[in-house]
Image: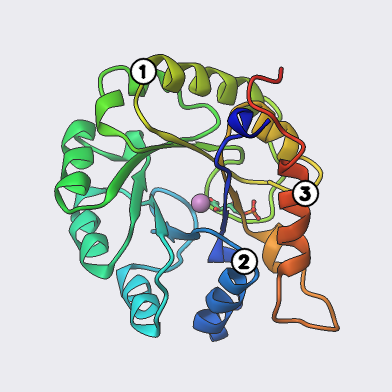
Amino acid sequence: MSDTRRDFLIAPSILSADFARLGEEVDNVLASGADIVHFDVMDNHYVPNLTIGPMVCQALRKHGVTAPIDAHLMVKPVDRLIDDFIEAGATYITFHPEASEHIDRSLQLIRAGGCKAGLVFNPATPLSYLDYVMDKVDMILLMSVNPGFGGQAFIPGTLDKLREARRRIDASGYEIRLEIDGGVKVDNIAEIARAGADTFVAGSAVFGATSEADPHRYDSVLRAFREQLATVEVGEP
Ligand SMILES: O=C(CO)[C@H](O)[C@H](O)COP(=O)(O)O
Ligand SMILES: [Co+2]
């Protein structure tokens, strides 16, 4: 059974964390078993919300965070911020192709800076943006909500898109992670994994799951995600 398992990674989105105690929140979610820190960058231009930038990413590194940081850039223009996030210690830098003037160049800039590069697809953005750059992406991120806010409901049509993205990755022969972002919960993560995702962003489901007994730990929700994922085998319909 083990060779039919994907290497599933869980990436809590700090968009739903308590920003007044961000370092501690990130420490706690990692100590609770998270794999990656998902870092949502919104510019009030490409998306109608304003969040955090490279200084906060750098502050997390200075605080001692060594886990991968997955910078999801919802900004336009893109390139100006790539160098800043490389300097700030991001591991993955992903951007929306519609927001980049030169997609191939943006991907190359990210890899040249030693980071892993990714393209993000909004629910209505076609996967054809991948046609000529499969050799330059380390991650494909499918949005299962329209970008800009946490706490929205998963758009079911994303499951077919995941299957199509998985087919493209498998056919390419490249090692590319397939990440899903938006509305991921304990009750849908297994279905999402069966459709082909291997990396799961979850914001409100994780940071909204504190208990009165221990408001600073997220073990139970992360354990519930892992239990669901343990039921999934690759190749299931
Ligand atoms: O990129 C995002 C929104 O644009 C967030 O990563 C995403 O919405 C996560 O939040 P939730 O799990 O609450 O849906
Ligand atoms: Co995101």
Asked which colour scheme the image uses, the reply is: rainbow
Please say whether residue 172 is visible from this viewpoint.
Answer: yes
| Residue identified by numbered label 3 | 227
Q: Is residue 52 above or below residue 235?
A: below
Image quarter of the N terminus? top right
Q: Dots 1 and 2: beta carbons under 8 Å?
A: no
Check disc 3: other Cα within 10 Å, few if <14, some if 14-19, many if 20+.
Answer: few
What amino acid is found at the position of numbered circle 3 in the picture? Glu
Question: In this image, 104 relative to 21: left or right?
Answer: left
- Residue pictured at 77% horizontal, 44% vertical: 228
Question: In this image, 46 relative to 115: left or right?
Answer: right
In depth, the one of 146 and 65 nearer the eye is 65
The alpha-carbon separation of the residues under discs 2 and 3 comes to 23 Å
In depth, the one of 57 and 115 nearer the eye is 115
Mark whose residue sits in front, 1 or 2: 1
Q: Position of residue 214 (x, y in %)?
A: 79, 83
Query: Could you tell which of marks 1 and 3 lies nearer the N-terminus?
Result: 1
- What is the number of the mark on residue 16? 2
Callout 3: helix, strand or loop?
A: helix
| Residue identified by numbered label 1 | 172
- Residue pictured at 55% horizontal, 41% vertical: 7
Callout 2: helix, strand or loop?
A: helix
Q: Position of residue 114 (x, y in %)?
A: 20, 53
- Residue pictured at 59% horizontal, 62% vertical: 34
